[in-house]
Image (cartoon, rainbow, N blue to C red):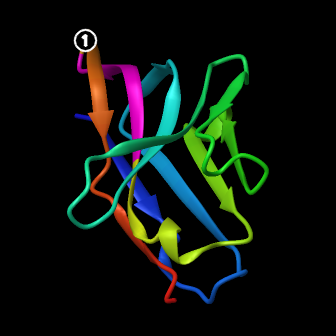
Amino acid sequence: QVQLVESGGGLVRPGGSLRLSCAASGSILSINNLGWYRQAPGKQRELVATITVGGYTNYADAVKGRFIISRDNAKNAVYLQMNSLKPEDTAVYYCNADRISYRSGALRITKNDCWGQGTQVTVPS
């Protein structure tokens, strides 16, 4: 069994910063690409940022220059440093792994498109 668990959300004033964390639990063997997505009330889930195994990053235009995605492969974790937060950043933030391989007993199992439970970020106007 494998899980992605986010933390670090909360309420922050405009212009403030937050750092989100997401760690994979279980007997992890490898994690492919990681990403952060968000979903605001009444809107579809959208991409925020992604990072490859090798560290190549990609950002949505709305967050470029303000957010930084990083990963720690030894800790099976991905982070999102969010700076200069705006009210329009208010959303539930989800981490995603497009592929995780893990050990279950003697088996090697690969799970695609893994999502965390989400963490709320609120920036009041």
Is 103 magenta? The answer is yes
Quarter of the image with the N terminus in it: top left
Magenta segment, prevailing SS (helix, strand or loop): strand
Magenta span covers which residues? 95-105
Q: Is residue 120 left or right of residue 18?
A: left
Q: Is residue 70 above or below residue 16?
A: above
Circle 1: is it few (<14), some (14-19), or many (20+) Cα within 10 Å? few
The residue located at (52%, 22%) in the rendering is: 33
Q: Is residue 8 left or right of residue 113?
A: right
State the image quarter where residue 97 is shown.
top left
The amino acid at mark 1 is: Ala
Between 74 and 81, the residue placed more toward the observer is: 81
Q: Is residue 13 left or right of residue 102?
A: right
Q: Which residue is mark 1?
A: 106
Q: Is residue 74 above or below residue 25?
A: above
Q: Position of residue 8 (x, y in %)?
A: 53, 71
Q: Position of residue 45 (x, y in %)?
A: 30, 46
Is 52 magenta? The answer is no
State the image quarter where residue 26 is shown.
top left
